[in-house]
Image (tube, grey):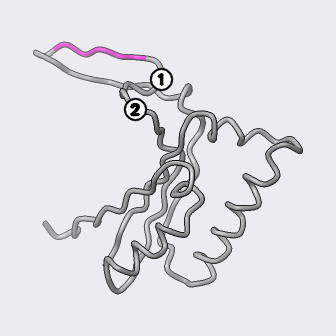
Amino acid sequence: MEYMLLFNQPAHELERRRDDPESSDYWESWRAYMSAIYAAGIVKSGNALEPPYTATTVRVRAGERTVHDGPFADSKELLGGYLTIEVASLDEALRWAARSPSSVTGSTEVRPVSPRDR
C-alpha cells in the first residue's frame, strides 16, 4: 500500500533550515532519517518544500477567485515536505512516521494514497 507522510513542523523549526552552524543538529537528524528510509527501499517519491512564506493560496467562492500570499491556515505547524512510501501495512507506515524528526517537534501525518483506478 502507498502512504504519504506529511512532515509538519512549527515555524521556528522550519527556520532552522538555513545553512549555518546552529542548524547542524537539525540537518543531521533529517539526513539520518532520510538515509534510513531510502535504504529501506520504500520511498516512491518526495520533496522538501520551500519555506511557507513562498506559498500562494487560491480560493474560489461564489465564482470569485481570491489569491493570498503565504499559507492560509490557522495552524501552529506548517508543511515542510512529504514522502510517498510503499509498505505492507498502516502499522509499518506509522513506524516510519514515528522515526521522523518532525514527529518530535511537530507532527507527521500519514495518509493512504487513493488507488489510481478510481
Instruction: Please provide percent x and percent y for residue 51.
Output: 59, 34
How crowded is the residue under tag 2: few (<14 C-alpha within 10 Å), some, or many (20+)? Answer: few
Label 2: which secondary element: loop
- In the picture as drawn, the residue positioned furthest to the front comes out as 104
Amino acid type for the residue under numbered disc 1: Gly
Label 1: which secondary element: loop
Contact, CB < 8 Å: mark 2 with mark 1?
no
Q: Check disc 1 and report the residue beneath it.
A: 70
Question: For the residues marked 2 and 1, what is the alpha-carbon distance in whole angstroms?
Answer: 13 Å
Q: Check disc 2 and report the residue beneath it.
A: 75
The quarter of the picture where the C terminus appears is bottom left
Residue stretch in magenta? 64-68
- In the picture as drawn, the residue positioned furthest to the right comes out as 21
Residue found at x 17% / y 70%: 117
Instruction: Please provide percent x and percent y for residue 57.
Output: 38, 25
Residue found at x 63% / y 41%: 13
